[in-house]
Amino acid sequence: MGAINIIGAGLAGLSAAVTLAERGVPCRLISLQPSERAQSVLAEGGINAALDTMGEQDSPALHFEDTVKGGCDLADPNAVAALTEHAPETVRWLESLGVPFARSGGEIALRSFGGQRKKRTAYAQSSTGKMLMTALIDEARKYEAQGLIRRYSHHELIRLVISGGECRGAHVRDRITGLCAELPGRVILASGGMNGMFPSRTTGTVMNSGDVTATAFSQGVLLSSPEMIQFHPTTVGIPGKRCLVSEAARGEGGRLFIAKATGEKWYFMEEKYPELGNLSPRDVVSREMYFARRQEDTAGEVCLDMTGLSDDIWKNRLSDLREELIRYTGIDPKNTPVPVHEGIHYFMGGIDVDIRHRTNIPGLYAAGECCGQYHGANRLGGNSMLGAVYGGRTAAETAAEGFSPSQESEPAFAPLDDEPLLTPARESFNERLAVILTEALGIVRRADVLESAIGKVRALSEEAVCQREKLRCALALAMLRGALERRESRGAHYREDFPQRSDDFRRTTVARFEANDAVISFREIPERRAEQ
Amino acid sequence: MTYILDITRQQSTDSQPYVQSIPFETDDPAATVAFAMRQINASPDCKDINGETVTPISWECGCLQRKCGACAMVISGRPMLACDAVLSRVARGGRVSIAPLKKFPLVKDLTVDRSAMMEALKSAEVWLKAHASAEERNEGFVFDASRCLQCGCCLEVCPNFYAGGEFSGTAAALPMARLMAALPERDRELEKSYLRHFYNGCGKSLACRNICPAGIDVDSLLVNSNAAAVWKRRFGGRGR
Ligand SMILES: Cc1cc2nc3c(=O)[nH]c(=O)nc-3n(C[C@H](O)[C@H](O)[C@H](O)COP(=O)(O)OP(=O)(O)OC[C@H]3O[C@@H](n4cnc5c(N)ncnc54)[C@H](O)[C@@H]3O)c2cc1C
Ligand code: SF4
Ligand code: SF4
Ligand code: FES
């Protein structure tokens, strides 16, 4: 019958699958693990839409302005306009699927989130991602029963089938049986962020290894903004990972301070940024925390002070967050400030797509955190779930254009032993790569450190024992070279040696794979079109 | 502190299981079984207590913070999440036994195939047939029921559940409760499905009580679902 292949079953993949099914277009929903295990279930604070239910005269135009400004003018304004314009209907759609958004006066309630001038974030306690996922999983099930969505859970992408310059299918492996098959049809990549490049150092799941992005890159798919990596200001260390303390903690009134040597608490964000204060964009807060710690007259970690929050907020809006903090830090945030530290949280860059979510390879699309759309140099909290759902839906609409069912029967799975991409990267290798990247791609970056890291990664690449290790090194080089060539500071990318923003670099970084390395160029950002 | 992890290893369904005892040293009081297994898998030179090299242990990992249900297994005799199993709390005399869930087909070592759970929800037709619009009193129920991880811990302890059977256990009852709570009108088909796939097969032994690692208040969700499906009352009449 023919079908469209979707790689990844988180928010973006599920949204794409349901959108195709609504149009009667069959798809295969391929993922390493069932949807319940996707990183999207971790999302906490909420999803943005200018629903204007709080009497603040919010509008998609203001949402647009905040997103473009938060992204430091690096996002495609036409894509952001489409996103923010469609945000209210996207959230209403999720509501109709039974997402239990918090309500006030019968309407969806909205909370404050970083970098936004209005209350615009719809939420369900601090478990918004899980609520969205449960609703979408149920909706997808309806179409699974009709045969429109065919689940290939526990399957991994090995490589794309690209011939004649077009993507014609996905080569996948069943992780249970070990058997492989080439699934024909267009492909939507929805494989999530590149956490696996920084094992134990991110707030996300270890299962988003970055292998899909690395493989696509090596097959000629362009990447954009690979150097743009978001550090979330408030994370705490737990065994094996960084645990997020949602921005909702500050949205509901939490304050950041550091102790001065004198013992006095210095609320540095409030002092330095009177307008947005603790709710400034994440790049700003993380950098200020870093600098506040390095100042000579301060001591110890930055603390998040939530002791002023009302009982009502603890009970109705942040009960799960409190429980988690007590469990992992032993500190009850209601009574005692919690020491927090910046942690890698989100990848603004990724697979390069246009406003309709097409990659540079015809027949190949990408959506969600694996793609480099909407967020420019810094993502606003609440915009990524929106980007994943709206992006997934848009990619599906585009991929469905001109789709015609075929008479082909489903390909059979068969053993395959000589495929070089079957061998997974060694965890010890991943760790060595991560050590290099962590040093060079932190909150503050510098040419000499980046140059030395490039040398080290190239040397490490020589030690690779399998194809996937090689490709991870190439992906790492795309991140490092992007950061080296961007000789300015903007958003999440801060260069100690070029601390100012430069108009010359108000362009998108584009990385192309060449000889196991990355070649960087910069592309003009389109002007905003009058009519969408 | 050095713990001994007694891990049940099995190459595939066709091969014999055996227990491999692996020492794990840590001074982190918060270290979990999941953390230990990740460390072990990342050290190519790791040896068991007999000096044999430990080949990578197969297990399902994900969020490492109790939110994705991937890492459910039987630890010190109790089904739980490996990322929730703090070594100092689950160890007995410095040893921790780690085995796969028994109710599902084994894939390898600690990895099992839980597809039957997703299949059960499909055969029970668990999806919305109308737009959701929960009554205010039911909003909390929708939230709570939506939190189910589909981890399978409740099925592991249930005497009446076996994979592929008609009775699908609490892991299927909660998604059905979500729909009942979220719908503005009663859905008779759904209620029938609840009877068939859950209520009629449940022996009320309550073995599943207090096992849920997500801490879901399973009791009140089931009481309200029963009230709706069996006694034809509106969902949500029973307090939380
Ligand atoms: C702790 C935390 C809190 C967050 N809170 C918020 C928030 O409040 N608001 C907000 O807007 N955003 C938030 N985010 C970000 C947001 O959750 C993610 O960006 C978004 O959910 C990504 O969705 P996705 O569908 O792109 O990817 P994912 O949900 O990561 O899904 C990726 C899918 O790809 C599959 N996959 C991966 N590799 C392969 C492979 N090799 N082969 C086959 N399949 C593969 C996976 O199995 C999975 O199904 C948060 C993120 C984290 C980590
Ligand atoms: S009450 Fe007993 S029979 Fe019913 S679901 Fe729970 S464990 Fe199974
Ligand atoms: S009810 Fe609890 S134990 Fe059962 S599958 Fe859901 S989360 Fe797991
Ligand atoms: S790894 Fe997600 S629940 Fe344990």
Image (cartoon, coloured by chain):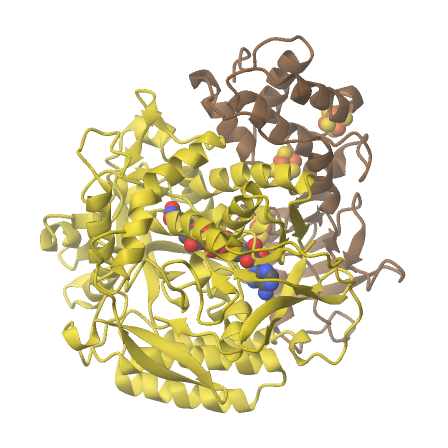
Instruction: Give the drawing colour for chain B.
Output: brown
**Above or below: residue B45 compared with residue A9:** below
How many numbered marks does the figure carry?
0
Q: Is residue A527 above or below residue B211?
A: below
Q: Which chain is yellow?
A: A
Q: From this viewpoint, is residue A80 visible?
A: yes
Along the horizontal axis of the image, is A233 left or right of B197? Answer: left
- A118 or B105, which lies in front? A118
Please say whether residue A263 is visible from this viewpoint: no
Image coordinates of residue A15 in percent, x first then y, are: 50, 47
Query: Compared to A287, does A403 lie above or below?
Result: above
Which quarter shows the N terminus of chain B? bottom right
Residue at 45 percent of width and 58 percent of height: A367
Instruction: Answer left or right for A500 relative to A345.
Output: left
Please state if A335 lies on the left or on the right of A186 as rendered: left
Q: Residue at x 47, y 24 (%)?
A: B140
Q: Residue at x 70, y 69 (%)?
A: B56
Q: Position of residue A455 (x, y in %)?
A: 41, 90
Q: Where residue A292 sits: x, y (%)?
A: 19, 62
Q: Position of residue A273 (x, y in %)?
A: 12, 53
Of residue A519 and residue A150, the one placed in the foreground of this image is A150
**Relative to A518, is A51 above or below?**
above
Q: Residue at x 16, y 48 (%)?
A: A276
Q: Ligand 3, what quadrant?
A: top right
Q: Nearer the viewer, residue A408 or A62?
A: A408
